[in-house]
Amino acid sequence: MIVVMKPGSTQQQINHIVELVEQLGLRSHVIVGTERTVIAALGEKRDGAKQALETGDGVEKVVPILAPYKMASTEVRKDPTCVSALEFKVGAGHIGVIAGPCSVENEEQILHVAREVKAAGAAALRGGAFKPRTSPYSFQGMKEKGLELLALARAETGLAVVSEVMAPEHVPLLKRYVDVLQVGARNMQNYTLLEAVGESGMPVLLKRGPAATMDEFLLAAEYILKTGNTQVILCERGIRTFEDHTRFTLPLATVPYLKQTTHLPIIVDPSHGTGKANLVAPMAVAAIAAGADGLMVEVHPDPEKALSDGYQSLTPAAFAAMMVECRKVARALGRDL
Ligand code: PEP
Ligand code: MN
């Protein structure tokens, strides 16, 4: 249920409703909006709870939350959420671009890419150090050494660093080096991991599982939000279909759909979404046109020699050209990039 407070309700009245919610055996979550405060009362339905809350001082109305995901829903929070780390801002009008190699490979590679993507307008650097690979014989990432190199690139460029965490026990290690924890598509429904990244209090980038529905995606986000961590970015990265002209199928209708159903920022990854470097820029432009709050793009100084995902990586020059096109579309739509 959502307890909608009257405009101008006092802090005392809000505190009283929070206490009442908890006495009813429900969890409370206060959302201070631009116009009024609402209190989400979460948990199993209880007889009489709605009536008890309705009579509270300062309460305007009590309405049920229809969506299965409660805290992610626009029913609970209308104002869009902005997720930020250093200069990187995404959502609530900010378009944030994350770029960098699929995997961190060596110091020269990551520093080179970091400088180039920053110059082209990215605000965050990506780079996998713990890599979820289909084959156990493929390059698995540089692990902690890779994280050290990412931190070095951050120190030099000021870019926020985004890197994937694959296991709950690695969260404290990643926390020492990165600014945003990425939960990969393969782990979207790893609920222990979702709780661990939520409890870290750090911004989280949650990628859609390749076979996940929108409700499953938003319920995965709900696991993170339920810990009290509101800094969640959703990332559409393509789904598995019968189609084989691309690595995955990139459904951009996800963007306007999610803009209507959740206040969380939604970004698009056209690199994994297409799996083909020549399709990345057009789909990045299309994502911005569809209203995406940001992009995640793989960039490598020499894609042919990349240790992972070279075929879908842009060169720094191609990335800079893509940014020029994205900026034109963003500006045409009254947005800044
Ligand atoms: C990645 O971003 O490098 C990655 C492994 O992506 P996904 O989890 O979407 O496959
Ligand atoms: Mn990749």
Image (spheres, rainbow, N blue to C red):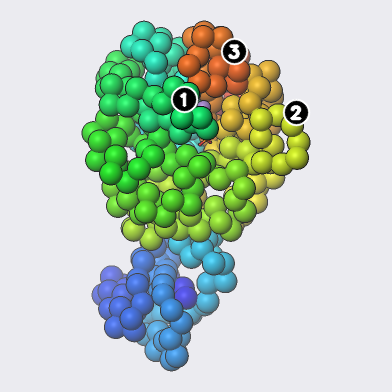
Q: Secondary structure at mark 2?
A: loop
Q: Amino acid at mark 3?
A: Ala
How far from the left and from the top, in percent, is residue 113?
44, 13
How far from the left and from the top, in percent, is residue 71?
45, 62
Above-or-below relation of 10 to 98: below
Cβ of mark 2 under 8 Å from ligand 1: the answer is no
Q: Secondary structure at mark 3?
A: helix
Left or right: 200 as drawn, with respect to 212: left
Q: Amino acid at mark 2?
A: His
Who's the residue at 27% across and 30% down the image? 177
The residue carrying mark 3 is 318
State whether residue 150 appears in this view: no
How far from the left and from the top, in percent, is residue 79?
49, 54
Left or right: 323 as drawn, with respect to 132: right
Above-or-below relation of 149 to 131: above
Return the mark for residue 137. 1
The residue carrying mark 2 is 245
The span from disc 3 to disc 1 (Cα, nearest Å) is: 30 Å
